[in-house]
Amino acid sequence: MTASESTPFDVEKVLAELTLEEKASLTSGSDFWHTQPVDRVGVPALMVTDGPHGLRKQVASSDHLGLGESVPATCFPTAAALGSSWDVDLVHRVGEALGRETRANDVGVLLGPGVNIKRTPLCGRNFEYVSEDPVVAGEIGTALVDGIQSQGVGTSLKHFAANNQETDRLRISAQVDERTLREIYLPAFERVVTRAQPWTVMCAYNKVNGTYASQDPWLLTTVLRDEWAFEGLVVSDWGAVHDRVPALAAGLDLQMPAAGSRPDDEVVAAVRAGTLDEAVLDQAVRRVLHLVARAQPAVVGTGTFDVDEHHALAREAAAAGTVLLRNEPVDGAPLLPLAEPARTLVVGEFARTPRYQGAGSSQVNPTRLDDALGALRAATAADLPFEPGFTIDGGPSGDDEALLAAAVAAARDAGTVLLFLGLPAPDESEGYDRPRLGLPENQVAALAAIAAVNPRVVVVLANGSAVDLPWRDLAPAVLETWLGGQAGGSAVADVLTGAVEPGGRLTETIPLRLQDTPAFGNFPGEAGEVRYGEGVLVGYRWYDTRELDVAYPFGHGLGYTTFAYGDVVATVRGEGAGSTVDVRVTVTNTGARTGSEVVQVYVRDPQAAVLRPVRELKAFAKVTLAPGESREIALTLTARDLSYWHPGLRRWVVGGGEMVVEVGASSRDVRTTSRVDVVGEPLWGELGVMSTIAEWLAHPVGARLAAPYLTLPEGAPEPDESMQAMIQQMPIKVLLDFGFAPLDRDGLDALVAAANAQDASGSGASVA
């Protein structure tokens, strides 16, 4: 078989024919974007290229940070905007389009999506990530992977794991406990892997608890393969491998990009010395060969795509991810949609020079680019006046004072002012974190000056992650567009004029201050470590549990119509690890136009034995309804949705007791609630001499065996509540040491052994 043939080669036959040196070479790239070919046995090179919101296939020079020119491709909205749509069907269609473009350019794997959690709004790469919540990130990521791979090309789920900052990203160690990893930082990856099986998973640059992700057997083998049954290939982020021999042993399969001959030589030497099992190398090579063979029908085919159709889809997606944060009435009516578009003044360089994507490896060379000013003029059939208003770092130069004076003068006589604000491109990029939470001072000053002469101000934001909004009372309407891709300008015009409703809801909380954010004080770390001290209280889990005021909560977003919720009905089925809860609620469009609502289902566990957030999103559904139309939404919560990760037992557990199911339009707009009783599962673990009296009494066997030794001597006074509480927290060994229990150390050891030897029914060994 030759490289030009479309029939995939026989992987096992090829593997058997390879020399040791050839095997080692196949675990590295041949250059920046290609796997290593082995012409002797007919193994071609496979091209992979950056995503995740558009194809970045470089034409000539190869680099990872977007400096080289790439082929024209549709620049879809970034993950921040796509995620804000909460629309898995739409995201799946975007994925299909990305897959078609990948295939048409003879590329086998698109490197994305990224589902890392937005731990802090200052992460410079947040525009590439979906949400602060793992359920939203996992559902959107699954839809994108399914869509792309439906076209016969692969994806690369990234960056695995705990890659939540750009500062010192190649060396930093994320110090994070297992419960926090399991509940916050791993579930989005788990959901995508178990439901969509991405062809590849990309390991992160950083260390996790002191071990580089590329060399972490717990991450790459125990969790990813043994627990989640991942079937594909593990590839490194570009430059993330520091020693390929332990990386291969840990579960890495492919080092990218090419790193010279030395790593290959080290692998060969390790196999010959017996320090690396050749079977481990064979498994990695087998996965590389399977990936290359799997992609051959696509990369040697003749794929095509419709440029206009994909641009229209990008426009639809940008509007669907646009979030209307605020729309207060002025003179008796909301400013949006625009009542008199022709009397509108447009201010702000972003309207003319759009900020539509972030910097770094995800930069796409768009097939075309819509600007909001041109789109608004076309939509209104009017030559709308425009003033730059201020300068933008990295944009056209000018005199801020003169620009602002001209904008204020024009605003005095305008009907409504559309003021386009946002973060300058240098503020957000792969490779470094944001310098501030707020907008540049000259933009805030422009808003204040314009609002002073015209109260009818609509702020249109362009940014890849949350910005603080201390100025929001100056603008009756605020529209968050994120980074909306190449058609974002037209999508904004659609939303502002009312041709399309703003379909987005926040997937990240907008805080009042940087000091309120969960990672404040534990970001970006020091001395090579960053401590995840907030634990599971990330995003809205932090703000809601601590009852902190926010500018706008997770899940918030307004539309051009209104919705009413009926009473939620929650029904429990099964018990323990077999528990499910069926949730049903009817939603009605009570407004005058068709619109969409995102129905969000949260779970609260007030009786948990560990600290749990006051509420956690577990399911959602986006529904579009005509005026007056009602629809019943039915969702099922699994036992996993009711569970938490038990640190002692190191597994998911359903604690049981009364749980609260809340349904609403945001984490702070709960419309209807139902309380349910869930039968939990046994939570006792192994007992020891340092187990507390409370732990012994909670154990069904330990309580029975220890009871004779925990009784008060005859005539002794009953301890009061405070004394009982103190005793409950004492290890049983301490009671023995204090002489309070008629048992010596050998007897205690026998008691421990007997308790752990018996099951909950009481059968098994007994104390002699």
Image (cartoon, grey):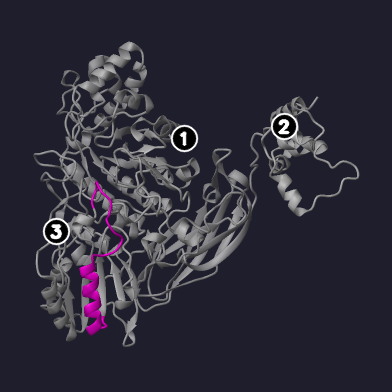
Q: Position of residue 270 (x, y in %)?
A: 31, 16
* Between discs 1 and 3, the one toward the N terminus: 1
Foreground residue among 165 and 529: 529
Q: Where is residue 415 in the image (x, y as percent from the top left)?
A: 20, 84
Which residue has dot 3 on it?
Answer: 394
Determine whether 153 is above or below 309 in the image: above
Secondary element at image label 3: loop
Q: Which residue is drawn at 19% across and 39% down?
A: 107
Determine whether 615 is above or below 113 in the image: below
Q: Is residue 492 visible?
A: no
Q: Residue at x 30, y 42 (%)?
A: 169
Q: Which residue range is magenta in the image?
A: 429-456
Q: Can residue 314 be seen in this view?
A: yes
Which residue has dot 2 on it?
Answer: 755
Q: Which residue is drawn at 51% across and 58% down?
A: 615
How far apart are the alpha carbons under marks 1 and 2?
A: 30 Å
How would you rate the neighbour count of disc 3 (Cα within 10 Å): few for under 14, some for 14-19, many for 20 or more?
A: few
Secondary element at image label 2: helix
Which residue has dot 1 on it?
Answer: 227
Give the residue type that dot 1 points to. Answer: Glu
| Magenta stretch encompasses residue 695 | no
| Magenta stretch encompasses residue 439 | yes
